[in-house]
């Protein structure tokens, strides 16, 4: 029953987010040496007695001397007010970093999906309509090789070619879309292309297999029997029915893209959420890491929720197992 | 009727040419990994030569920024990648699978509670979870294996759980219970054998995934320690010398791509063979 499924799915959202936040919190407390020690040892050249005192002071200041449960509740309360504390490495509130970086990464993800859909779906259609011809084989080998070329290799390869052939260099300043759409696209198009190549492989494969399945359905035979042209059959009857899993798959993959974005952003020097997270991890800026991972979990879960709801709405047969 | 195994293998290869190609690549890879000490002309960590030497007769793949022989590092890298991929997948999929099987069989509160744990582990994008785990555990090859195993556990648990939910309702399970089989015996003798095909597919499909994630972590500087011959870390070093020494990123990149390509082809073929809807009868 769709109603019950939707209700259950909605009810699970908040507890899952909460338990994920606990997981992140506990994980980052497992790090050997707490933040106070790291901060003091990073800067300090003082004697160890002075450092000891500084560490104790910092712990009290940051509330690290309190029990973990108390710390977590305090963190959660603040998080509800969109207060994620102070970033040590950037010396400013984490929420400011998020506000600046999240939109850029979302734009990159959106652009990636758009590009991938634009070429992956038609390729899948061609491959299915011309099943077992040389076009089909070429597309299948292309897409399976797309799956096999890790993003950090294709990304670096594209960067290498850009540098070698066009003398292109990653821009030093990020220009937002609202300031100059053209400049902005010039910055994001290459990382988007690199990632789109990677994710287009499963989209092509899924489109192909879905279309092949649908083409064998009774209503397609009916359409043929009443004398419809092949083109009308494929585009009007078959394709619209086979794209449903593709669309939901893309939504689901969009969430996973958040992980891949860390790598692409680093290769192409895009100052987004992913590169911020990577540098926060390497600089042991744990308040920033915690907030960023939490926000990623939030976006990821929201996307998954939307995809599931969309699916339930589009396909009434679905029910919660 | 039993056919000689070689002929069955030949028939299989004829039916799945792409899968056979994948199997060929995987065999070469495994041999490279096993015989790395014999094949590699130098040690993986020997920094005894001039840095940034282009490919030549003495150094077929050139040398890196620390003057290490790239060919040797790529060969030793096969051993590292395969070891990390294989162990993490075996541990992650086996533990996750058993977890899914048992909780699904028991059902009730145990099942719903365990599903909430799975939800939690799946609430983070995979790479981000691996990254957080590595930040917490610290950099070492064993910790990479642990992080990858944790990453794979929930998927395996969920997949096998849904399978066992349907197996549990089968008449033969009821029959086994009716003749007085204890639960552990039902699980061991009647449930587990029926999950084997899915288990094998999960393992083969995920090895290439684990290898890619390992390389991603190394690429981000959060995987194995930097002197370990990880293809991902070699790529990072290569990225820094993109213009002057392109061989530094090209060869490890090719190595990992060919590896993943072979494993994907093989995994695809195995999935096709174990899916009864696609099986054409193997005789």
Image: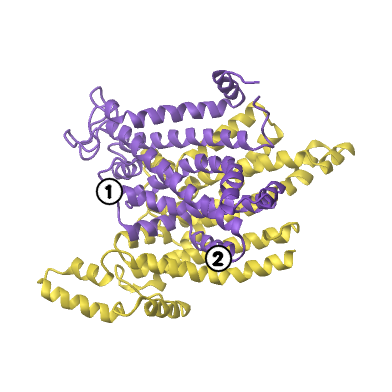
Chain colours: A yellow, B purple
Quarter of the picture holding the C terminus of chain A: bottom right
- Specify which label sits upstream in the sequence, 2 or 1: 2
- Give the structural element (helix, strand or loop) at label 2: helix
Seen as rendered, the residue at the extreme left is A47
Q: Residue at point 30% right, 35% down? A: B76
Q: Which residue is mark 1?
A: B225
- Mark 1 neighbour class, 10 Å CA radius: few under 14, some 14 to 19, many 20 or more: some
Question: Of B99 and A172, which appears nearest the observer?
Answer: B99
> Residue A300, position in %: x, y?
53, 62
- Mark 2 neighbour class, 10 Å CA radius: few under 14, some 14 to 19, many 20 or more: few
Label of residue A250 in the image: none
Q: Residue at point 58% right, 40% down? A: B197
Q: CA distance from mark 2 to mark 1?
A: 37 Å
Q: Nearer the viewer, mark 2 or mark 1?
A: 2
Label of residue B113 in the image: 2
Relative to A302, is B198 above or below? Answer: above
- Give the structural element (helix, strand or loop) at label 1: loop
The answer to which image quadrant residue B138 occupies is: bottom left
Q: Residue at point 38% right, 52% down? A: B146
Relative to B24, is B162 above or below? Answer: below
Report the side of A320 relative to B24 (left or right). right
> Residue B175, position in %: x, y?
70, 48
Q: Residue at point 61% right, 19% down? A: B3
Question: Of A103 and A283, which appears nearest the observer?
Answer: A283
Q: Is residue A100 visible?
A: no
> Residue B218, position in %: x, y?
34, 48
């Amino acid at each position: 029953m769709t109603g019950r499924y939707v209700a259950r799915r909605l009810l699970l959202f908040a507890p899952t987010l909460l338990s994920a936040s606990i997981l992140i919190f506990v994980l980052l407390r497992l790090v050997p040496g707490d933040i106070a020690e790291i901060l003091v040892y990073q800067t300090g050249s003082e004697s160890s007695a002075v450092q000891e005192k500084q560490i104790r002071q910092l712990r009290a200041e940051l509330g690290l001397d309190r029990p973990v449960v108390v710390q977590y509740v305090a963190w959660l309360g603040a998080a509800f007010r969109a207060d994620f504390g102070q970033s040590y490495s950037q010396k400013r509130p984490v929420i400011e970093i998020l506000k600046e970086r999240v939109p850029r990464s979302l734009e990159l993800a959106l652009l990636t999906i758009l590009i991938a859909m634009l070429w992956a779906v038609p390729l899948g259609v061609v491959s299915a309509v011309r099943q077992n011809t040389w076009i089909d084989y070429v597309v299948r080998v292309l897409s399976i090789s797309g799956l096999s070329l890790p993003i950090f290799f294709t990304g670096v390869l594209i960067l290498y070619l850009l540098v070698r052939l066009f003398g292109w260099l990653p821009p030093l300043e990020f220009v937002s879309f609202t300031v100059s759409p053209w400049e902005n696209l010039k910055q994001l198009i290459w990382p988007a292309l690199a990632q789109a190549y990677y994710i287009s492989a499963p989209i092509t494969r899924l489109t192909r297999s879905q279309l092949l399945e649908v083409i064998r359905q009774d209503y397609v035979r009916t359409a043929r029997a009443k004398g419809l042209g092949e083109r009308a059959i494929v585009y009007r009857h078959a394709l619209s029915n086979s794209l449903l899993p593709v669309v939901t798959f893309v939504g689901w993959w969009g969430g996973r893209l958040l992980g891949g974005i860390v790598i692409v952003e680093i290769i192409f020097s895009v100052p987004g959420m992913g590169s911020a997270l990577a540098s926060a991890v390497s600089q042991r800026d744990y308040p920033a890491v915690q907030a960023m991972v939490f926000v990623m979990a939030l976006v990821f879960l929201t996307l998954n929720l939307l995809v599931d709801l969309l699916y339930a709405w589009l396909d009434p047969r679905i029910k919660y197992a | 009727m039993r056919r000689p195994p070689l002929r069955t293998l030949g028939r299989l290869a004829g039916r799945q040419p792409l899968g056979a190609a994948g199997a060929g690549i995987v065999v070469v890879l495994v041999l490279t990994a096993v015989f790395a000490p014999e094949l590699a002309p130098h040690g993986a960590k020997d920094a005894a030569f001039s840095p940034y030497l282009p490919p030549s007769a003495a150094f077929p793949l050139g040398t890196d920024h620390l003057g290490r022989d790239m060919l040797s590092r790529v060969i030793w890298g096969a051993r590292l990648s395969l070891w990390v991929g294989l162990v993490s997948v075996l541990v992650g999929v086996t533990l996750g699978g058993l977890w899914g099987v048992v909780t699904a069989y028991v059902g009730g509160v145990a099942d719903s509670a365990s599903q909430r744990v799975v939800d939690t582990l799946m609430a983070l994008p995979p790479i981000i979870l691996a990254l957080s785990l590595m930040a917490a555990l610290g950099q070492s090859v064993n910790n990479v294996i642990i992080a990858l195993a944790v990453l794979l556990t929930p998927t395996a648990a969920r997949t096998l759980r849904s399978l066992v939910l349907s197996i549990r309702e089968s008449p033969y399970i009821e029959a086994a219970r009716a003749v007085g089989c204890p639960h552990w015996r039902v699980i061991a003798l009647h449930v587990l054998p029926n999950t084997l095909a899915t288990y094998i597919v999960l393992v083969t499909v995920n090895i290439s995934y684990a290898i890619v994630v390992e390389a991603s972590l190394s690429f981000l500087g959060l995987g194995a320690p930097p002197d370990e011959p990880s293809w991902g870390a070699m790529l990072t070093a290569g990225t820094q010398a993109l213009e002057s020494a392109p061989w530094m990123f090209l060869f490890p990149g090719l190595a990992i791509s060919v590896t993943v390509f072979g494993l994907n082809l093989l995994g695809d073929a195995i999935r096709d063979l174990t899916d009864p809807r696609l099986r054409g009868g193997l005789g």
